[in-house]
Image (cartoon, coloured by chain):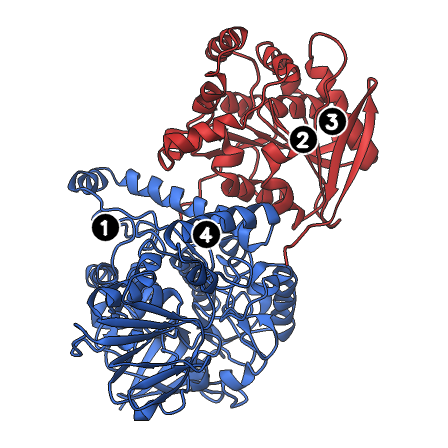
Chain colours: A red, B blue
Amino acid sequence: MLDNQPFREGAVTVGGVSVRYRVAGPENDRTPLVLVHGTAGSIDGHYGYIFPMMAYRQRVIALDWSEPEGDALELADLVAQVKAVITAEVPEGPVTLMGYSLGACVAALTAYEMGDKVANLILAAGWLRTDTHQKMRNDVWRQLRDQDSASITQYMTFCAFSPAFMNMRTLTDMKAAAGMLKITPFVDKQMDLNTRIDIAAECEGIAAKTLVIGCTYDMMVPKHHSKQLFGAIEDARYAEIPSGHAVVHERAAELFHYVDRFTRQPDEFPAGTIIPAQKP
Amino acid sequence: MTTETDILIVGTGFAGLGMAIQLKRAGRENFIAIERAGDVGGTWRDNHYPGIACDVPSHLYSYSYLPNPDWSRVFSPGGEIQAYIRKCAEDEGILPHIHFHTDMLKSTWDEASKRWVVETSKGTYVAKILITGTGHLADGHMPRIEGLDSFVGDVFHSANWDHSVSLEGKRIGVVGSGASAIQIVPEMQKVASEMVVFQRSAPYMIPRWDREFTEGERRMCRRDPSVVEDLRSEIFWSGEFNFAQRRNIPRFLNEAKALAVGHREAHIKDPDLLAKLTPDYEIGCKRLLISNTYYPAIAAENATLEASALKRVEGNMAYGASGTGYELDVLVFATGFEAVRPPFAARIFGSEGISLDAHWDRGMQAYDSIAVNGYPNLFIINGPNTGLGHNSVVYIIEAQVDYIMGALQQIEEQSIEVIEVKRTAEDAYMEKLDTMAQGTVWLAGGCKSWYVDDRSGRLTLVWPDFAHSFRDENGTFHPEGYDMQPAPVAAE
């Protein structure tokens, strides 16, 4: 008999579009955890591991972004969706808010705007301000997309995983993984938004107790971005996972380890700590 | 003759030796390790059957503080692991602390002297602190088989292999299809004229990503130890990922199952054999096995899979429960170990004079998986709820050693004479574990396994969570769980 975890689905309407979310796990002394996925992601795509595993520990809420109306996507659109879900499910707060990749940028801005309703913040592979290195990668992506190149998903997969992870698999495995990526017009808008992120000023004003997680072999959002967040956010501590950008797949269990420890005891490490890696 | 010591360790496998090394490194000299055999290594000393290897990659299945750049393969053979353990004991200067051929017969807590009195095959020891490191795989389990005495051929257990028996061209019966059996069977198939495997229940099996390391790779590991560190981290965390399968989450369980089904179907073409080799429970409920050679061996011309347990023996005939009989020259019992009711527990008597085995009449349990109420000054390494279905037990052992080191430090700093876990703390811990275990594949997977105690239906052998959370929760001493009595101050 499989352990089919009970969960509940909900929806809120934001700017005329419906935003769907999922809730699971017991209510206990841990602050509810709200999960925000990243570019081209979803609850199952980016939190397929973290969501069910954390739901054995505590209350977890995760949302799937909905495409807002309009030609361009702004960070504010996604922040509004996250805020609406938090307000619907945990109206009085506080929550622990976690974002991954572009979702980390969304989570950081949400934490800034919601103040003490976001007591704790986890930013995995996020960034403060888009830099030339990211713009260059994004530009190649844009060209492949405009050419309708069949190589685009392989390029994304190549950028997403660390060499060590890839080398445990075959080229056929990696190509199969690439084949599962779907690019929609909404993803186009997310990729455009990725070129225009600048939350440096807001990060200085984040009060939440924050865990920043950088990925050692990240070629999409290299770890110096996480170091910048670690510096910019006053009550931040930093952990590093030896993974590519796709840490939610590559090192899902290690990511779980940091999320689990932090949600259990957010003040285990004082602000400014570089949390030492477990040496198994 | 009575030997006195501060700390007495029982066993010198990964657990006992790991404890000894940390004591020595911390500058504690007043300890003795007793070992019933003539060498260190525990299960790796006792198990030397053909084909023996470990299911955890060697770079992880070793002490974190004693990395070995020279492993020959991803999954090194058992003899290499034994040599590694031996070298650790030598390099760390532990051998002089070990009393070999010294079997613990009876350990009794003496309330008057606040000491453990340990009777052994080589005399009596008296110790302030008793630490057991006797392992889950220490004593081979032999099923009672009707008429086995009448068998005219050779009989032995996999953990006590008789290398003097010539197997070439013989008709060999292998009893069991667990972790030892699947390593033995391919070797027997090579030498036997005929081979019969008695299988009580079919195991799940996935490919073994094994290969030899080149000399260049080994030199790289010697030149740059960070390479080994990175490898350990990679192996450990990919192992941790698989806990989601044991947690019984459909998506991850089904991924594992697809891998096992694909592996089975790639090797077994005969539909009858395929049916016999298809388990009737969920993957991971029993130990998940890894092998590339078992299926080809069982499908070979000279091999027969008897899909029932060995029921009785008569002369040179061995009969399965199905009633089918086979004429055999050799019977190998690969029937596992006494893990659920470890024999050491029947030899330890606490403050009320009851053996730990009797005390555990509803199954093993211990606070923080290490201490038992009624058994003061006793720490159990690798005891209840410390086994894993998805990662390296050496990692668990190291966490437990750290815990004990913390306890010993407190005992010394506060001159504690008696330390005993509170009954309430032990019960609360077990209640927490019972809750964690609900719904896991070990309890809900529809199988009978050595992870679960028949008498209570409780998961007593396995830690029902990630390995890393074992270290988070049980890697440091928790004084709040214990009653501690300081030693009386001596009058002048």
User: Is residue A177 visible to us here?
Assistant: yes
Compare residues B38 and A44 and report the one nearer the observer.
Answer: A44
Cα gap from disc 1 to disc 4, whole angstroms? 27 Å
Compare residues B88 and B186 and report the one nearer the observer.
Answer: B186
Q: Amino acid at mark 2?
A: Ala
Q: Amino acid at mark 1?
A: Trp
Cα gap from disc 4 to disc 2, whole angstroms? 45 Å
Q: Position of residue B9 (x, y in %)?
A: 35, 74
Circle 2 packing at 10 Å, graded few (<14), some (14-19), many (20+), is many
Q: Disc 2 vs disc 3: which is toward the camera?
A: 3
Q: Quadrant of residue A22?
A: top right
Identify the element where label 4 is drawn.
helix
Cα gap from disc 3 to disc 4, whole angstroms? 40 Å
Q: Amino acid at mark 3?
A: Val
Q: CB under 8 Å between callouts 4 and 2? A: no
* Residue under pointer 2: A208
Q: Chain of mark 4?
A: B
Q: Amino acid at mark 4?
A: Ala
